[in-house]
Image (cartoon, helix red, strand yellow):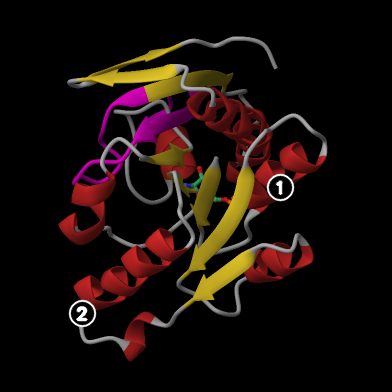
Amino acid sequence: FRIAVFASGSGSNFQALADAVQAGKLDVRIELLVCDKPRAKVVERAEQAGVNVFAFKPKDYAAREAYEADILRKLEEHEIDLIVLAGYMRIITPVLVEPWYGRMINIHPSLLPSFPGLHAVRQALDHGVKVTGVTVHYVDGGMDTGPVIAQRAVSIELDDTEETLMERIHRIEHELLPHVVQRISQDKVRLTGNTTRFEEGRG
Ligand code: GRF
């Protein structure tokens, strides 16, 4: 089962996936990293892990659809089964969404549908909610919409700052994402209409 990870920044979630594979807890091959920022830290992490990298500069293309067409070709070339968006900071167009619907997931640092978009952790703090969390969902045409696969709650403490809360959320992300990818690779996630059935299983 071959996955492609799309990321734009630090790539701590990429690392969590790579570490889980290394530790024998995640039985997939991380075949490809797709990155829109050739100098991002995640590119180094991929090279370190021996993962193929497709890094591109959006500016080199006339339109989103044009680099997405290149991405589509790479996905085919590498016989990818699942796309994992992990901090990929670009809008995805129907060029990618349509052929990959049901085979593309995203991780987001809130309990969707609360706080979609950028700065979800800050949004939760600003709103004053007591509980936020992490969501893994299938990607559809919207911004952080799409059928939810799994969620974990994280309590907000009185003295939390964006940094402290973000750190606890990251820790949860690093457990949840490899777990969900593992269950998908084992065919334990079913998507029917707008709802999913996720068999948690062990590990
Ligand atoms: C994560 O918080 C993820 O939920 C969001 O972007 C962040 C990426 O962090 N979509 P990292 O690059 O994996 O460290």
| Left or right position of 45 against 4 | right
Is residue 131 visible to the viewer in this orientation of the structure? no
Is residue 147 visible to the viewer in this orientation of the structure? yes
Q: Amino acid at mark 1?
A: Ala
Distance in Å between CA atoms under marks 1 and 2: 31 Å
Residue 149 coordinates in the image, percent (x, y): 40, 23
The residue singled out by tag 2 in the image is 63
Quadrant assignment, res 178: top right
Name the residue at 35% across, 18% down: 190
The residue singled out by tag 1 in the image is 18
Circle number at residue 133: none
State the residue lying farthest toward the bottom.
60
Name the residue at 46% across, 39% down: 107
Residue interval drawn in magenta:
127-148
Question: What secondary structure is marked by label 2?
Answer: loop
| Left or right position of 25 against 116 | right
User: Against 152, is 13 above or below?
Assistant: below
Q: Amino acid at mark 2?
A: Ala
Query: Local crowd at mark 2 within 10 Å, few (<14), some, or many (≥20)?
Result: few
Name the residue at 35% across, 68% down: 73
Question: Does residue 70 belong to the magenta stretch?
Answer: no
User: Against 37, is 135 above or below?
Assistant: above
Q: Earlier in the sequence, mark 1 or mark 2?
A: 1
- Say whether marks 1 and 2 touch (CB < 8 Å): no
Residue 197 coordinates in the image, percent (x, y): 37, 12
Residue 88 coordinates in the image, percent (x, y): 44, 57
Question: Does residue 144 belong to the magenta stretch?
Answer: yes
